[in-house]
Amino acid sequence: MNAPSRALLLLALVVAAINLRPGITSLAPLIERIADELALSRSLISLTTALPVLCMGLLAPFAPRLALRVGLERTVALCMGVISAALLMRLAAQSSVVLIASAVLLGAAIAIAGPLLSGFIKRHFAGQMGTVVGWYSLSMAIGGAAGAVLTAPAAQLFGDSWPQGLAVWALPAVLGLLLWLCLPSRAESAGAAEAGSGLPWKQPRAWMISCFFAIQAGLFYALATWAVARYHEAGLTLLHSNALFSISMLMGMPSAFLLPWLAQRFNRYALLVACGLVASVSLAMITLVPTFAPEFWAVTIGFGLGGSFALSLVLPLYEAGSPLAVSRWTAMMLCMGYCMACLTPVLTGLARDLAGHYQLPFMVLTSLALLMTALAWVMRNGPRHSS
């Protein structure tokens, strides 16, 4: 088989990345309705976000081993197939067991696909890392924004059926499956398995990067789960609340593409501090005065968190000096980061159940954003290897 063109390889990467987020963000516009119809507490319904994130952390180190057995391209195709099946399961999501089971399958597939897509970038785009990582993070932001913006209209289109509104995201996953099946599968070398072992547990900076990644991911998934409910509780209409959440998801797209490009030209840690400060101020306003200029703060929180996520993806490239070391740092960042981040949506929902309102848990989220900013400040004087 002829080698695929770089355009086809980039298209496959973009389509796969788009499919890593809608299954999670599509729940936010409907989560209060789902919780009421299924008679679930906020802490229990938050498992639909928390469990995929937990799987993304626990299973990430196993991705290279599976790729060694099956091949990187075929493993990603398998993940696209599992994502398709998990989202189709949501046609029967009136059962809370089915809804939560679909979340587990979704998280398992994303856990395996994410690290392998980074390896895919290293294999095919080694000379254009910054630009291609920008497209990669932009594509994930597009998928996340699409899930937030289009799910409610899709449910209305299907006769106000929220299970069908959730299941419609199986369509782009099927497209991703077909596209990745068209790519030739290359055998992996025995050394690829080492990328999932020997993690830098004794490196303080690896822990700091993992904690930074965990906080920004935890903030993202907490907002993806509860932002609409927070706005609605403050007195905004459900339509307005969904629009604000959609704005924040959409604003993650320009920052997801712009920040990796800027990181090649400016001090990336200064950019991290700036993103953290923007996110902290925005969360404070959403917490304390959510009805004051809400569109402006929706824009800034989306830009701040989107930029923090995009920059965190490139940190291992600059912290480690070799491709194998980069893989190990990335595996630790994803494993520890997502394992810790999965607690944020659950604890936010639990705090809301206990306090009876969202202001208290959102004050905690604001404190986490300040801690994230402090971590970026502490890391600013560290080593800066080039990729």
Image (cartoon, rainbow, N blue to C red):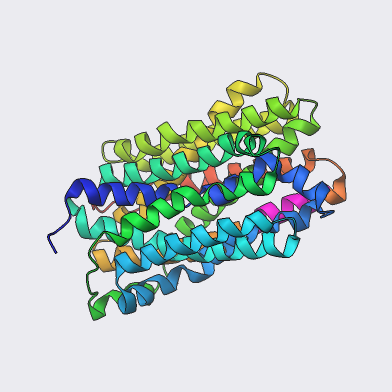
Where residue 126 sits in the image (x, y, percent)? 19, 54
* Residue 367 visible at all: no
Left or right of residue 116, residue 341 in this image: right
Highlighted magenta segment, given as a residue range: 343-352
Quadrant of residue 297 within the rendered picture:
top right
Where residue 314 sits in the image (x, y, percent)? 35, 50
Q: Is residue 278 magenta?
A: no
Q: From what the image shows, is residue 294 above or below residue 115? A: above
Where residue 77 sits in the image (x, y, percent)? 37, 63
Q: Is residue 347 magenta?
A: yes
Residue ID at (33%, 68%): 74
Q: From what the image shows, is residue 39 above or below residue 228? A: below
Residue ID at (71%, 38%): 160
Q: Residue furthest front?
A: 159
Quadrant of residue 220 within the rendered picture:
top right
Quadrant of image for the N terminus: bottom left
* Residue 106 visible at all: yes
Q: How many marks?
A: 0
Q: Residue furthest top?
A: 293
Where residue 323 sits in the image (x, y, percent)? 25, 64
Residue ID at (30%, 55%): 317
Left or right of residue 178, residue 334 in this image: right
Overall secondary structure of the magenta section: helix
Left or right of residue 386, residue 196 in this image: right
Q: From what the image shows, is residue 35 above or below residue 323? A: above
Quadrant of residue 300 within the rendered picture:
top right
Left or right of residue 118, residue 238 in this image: right
